[in-house]
Amino acid sequence: MSVPSTQTRRAALGATGTVVALALAGCPLAFGGTSEEIRVTLANEDDASHRLSVTVAFEGSTLLDREVSLAAGESTSEMISNPDTTGDARMRAAVDGGQYVEADVEVGPGSGIRSMTAEVTTEGTVSVWAGRT
């Protein structure tokens, strides 16, 4: 039975460390950091076309104000800037001119926020949520 030498193990560990460091270089998200931009996805999971209205506001500024018509199963997304200060943004969404659904989403440095989604459900209602992935 052959036992690996200390030199071989050190070389392997050194190479692994180099690969991990290169993979993570310049990536603040690798350790749970916050993205400079937030992906906002507007989706229609229903089997009928719908009009989806979405706004995202933070400290008196509108980060996003969109109204889109989405065919059944269609989605679209765009990037918005993550604010420089931490606080709650208000995300509002309505389907076909109906009542708005709202959610407060922590944004800014340290929030870990990476995405927001407004989705027309299979029942034709709207859901909103945010994610750190």
Image (cartoon, rainbow, N blue to C red):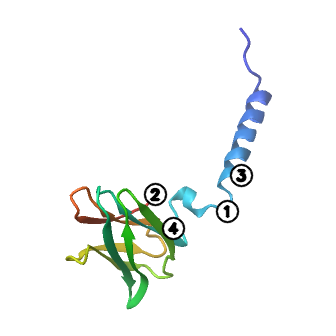
Q: Secondary structure at mark 3?
A: helix
In the image, 88: left or right of 76?
A: left
Q: Quadrant of residue 117?
A: bottom left
Q: Which residue is mark 1?
A: 26
Q: CA distance from mark 2 to mark 4?
A: 10 Å
Give the answer, above or below, for where 114 lies relative to 104.
above
Image: 128 above or below 19: below
The image shows residue 42 at horizontal and vertical percentages of 39, 67
The amino acid on which the numbered mark 4 sits, given as a three-letter code, is Thr
Q: Are marks 2 and 1 in contact (CB under 8 Å)?
A: no
Is 114 or 48 nearer to us in this picture? 48
Please give the residue where the numbered disc 3 appears in the rendered image: 22
Residue on which disc 2 sits: 133
What's under tag 3, amino acid-wise?
Leu
**Mark 2 Cα within 10 Å, few/some/many (few <14, many 20+)?**
few
Q: Upstream in the sequence, badge 2 or badge 4?
A: 4
The image shows residue 89, relative to residue 72, as above or below, that is below
CA gap, disc 2 to disc 1?
18 Å
Whichever of callouts 2 and 3 sits on the residue coming sooner in the sequence is: 3
